Amino acid sequence: MRIKELYVEGFGGLGPLSLSFAPGLNLILGPNEAGKTCLMEFIRAALFGLVKRDGAYQRYLPLDGRPYGGRVVVEEDGGRELVLVARFPGLPRREGKGEGEWIFPREMGALLYSRVFSLGLAQVSNLTLLSGEEMAQHLYSTALGPLGKAYAQAVEELERSREDLFKAKGQKPLINQLVREIKSVDGELSRLKALPSRYEELLRELKALEGELERVTEEWARVRREREEWDILARAHPLFSQLEEIQRLLEGEGLPSSFPPQGLERLGTLEKELEQLEGELEEVRLLLEPVEKALAQPLQGGDILSREGEIMAIREEWALIKEKRRRLLEVDGHLSVLDGKIKEGMDYLELNSLPPRPTGVVWERLKGFMEGFSALDKERLALEKELELREEERERRESELETLRGMAPQKPPLPRDEVMARQEFVSQAKEHILAAPSFWQMAVSVFFLLLG
């Protein structure tokens, strides 16, 4: 492909300008600032286009307002001519209807064209310093495009890599270090091969040490189990001491060392009832005592008249005496019932005789222990109830979770990195929401903005 003709309408200081090129090499001469570089940039822009963000777009705007662009006639290898119309900014377009597609920009590329076929003065001056081989390397690396590495740099890098691996009489290269290490290992291996008896001795020592290690491991396990047992005993020692103290108190008072469930409460109730009945019995006996004395004396006629007042007082209290006598019979009945209950308690405790009543100190301590046990029992019942409620709540949530799993779409689990990224995104979103102004602040800001 070659450029046959071009026409510049406006490009920098050029235009209007028309040029024709013959086959082969064409030389364009001109003094400094004649527009040679500007013409080279026009050809590049006409072939590959020019966009506004490119620095050359502003640099080559026409000076006198002429149309920005031009036209280029290209002759392909088969002799077909294509007319490219360039209007900047934008890409060149074909004029007229031709056959096929012009694929030059896609195959060549603007970067490769600029490096190989459109060299500026700075690039040419740098090339003059290169030798023939370096020039060939430069052109080869340039043809690789933006993704390739410079050939000379690649050769230098490979040479450095080779020297890093091996260098005659070197110390730092990797292969030299490995060779030294191999020699050192060979020397150590030779030394070990020369000591077979020492090797056998080391094997025996190793087996002995393994046996000792196994024995020490078993001993350690035994000591650990023993320590756990001692820890349990240490935690149980305070309770055991309290139990021994209670047993000593019971033995000192002559009381049984064991009680039926709620035995102390039942015994206390019976004692209260017994004390009440004994008090009532004593009160009735005091009332009946003067009556019994009076009845025990012989009756005489004169005495009867003289004691008329006493007889009248007794008649007035006779109803009360009858009521007290009836109450006395009831008390006797209650006492019989209490005797029966006490007998049942003694049979339950397997006692032949009723133990002596505990002293006040022992009785108070026993009641204190019973109250503490009762509080602990209530706390145990409350904890068991709470445990049942939590177990029901756990079963309910597990059921809900299984239901939700069945309803959820079957998707593979997210990778850990993606989960962490989503959590970070949610955290940042929360921070932005918290840092954002409130609705009223935004409304006031908009109001003052409209007023201003």
Image: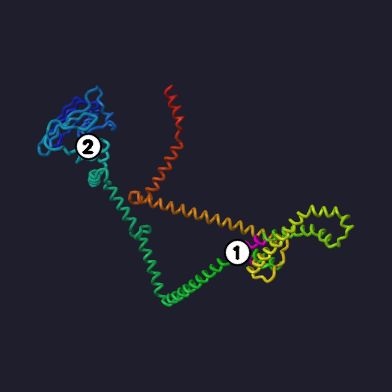
Where residue 236 is drawn, which disc sits there?
1
Question: Which element type, helix, strand or loop, lies under badge 2?
Answer: loop
Bounds of the magenta span?
A: 258-268
Where residue 118 is drawn, which disc sits there?
2
Looking at the image, which residue is at 73% across and 63% down? Answer: 359
Q: Quadrant of residue 56?
A: top left
| 361, above or below 146, in the image | below
Looking at the rendered structure, the kind of residue marked 2 is Ser
Residue 233 rendering spot, x and y as whole percentages? 59, 66
| 115, above or below 288, in the image | above
Which part of the image, by quadrant, shows the C terminus? top left
Q: Quadrant of residue 63?
A: top left
The residue lying toward the viewer, choosing from 235 and 345, is 345
Instruction: Determine the residue located farthest toward the left in the rendered image.
Output: 79
Instruction: Determine the residue located farthest toward the right in the rendered image.
Output: 302
For residue 330, side relative to residue 309 (left or right): left
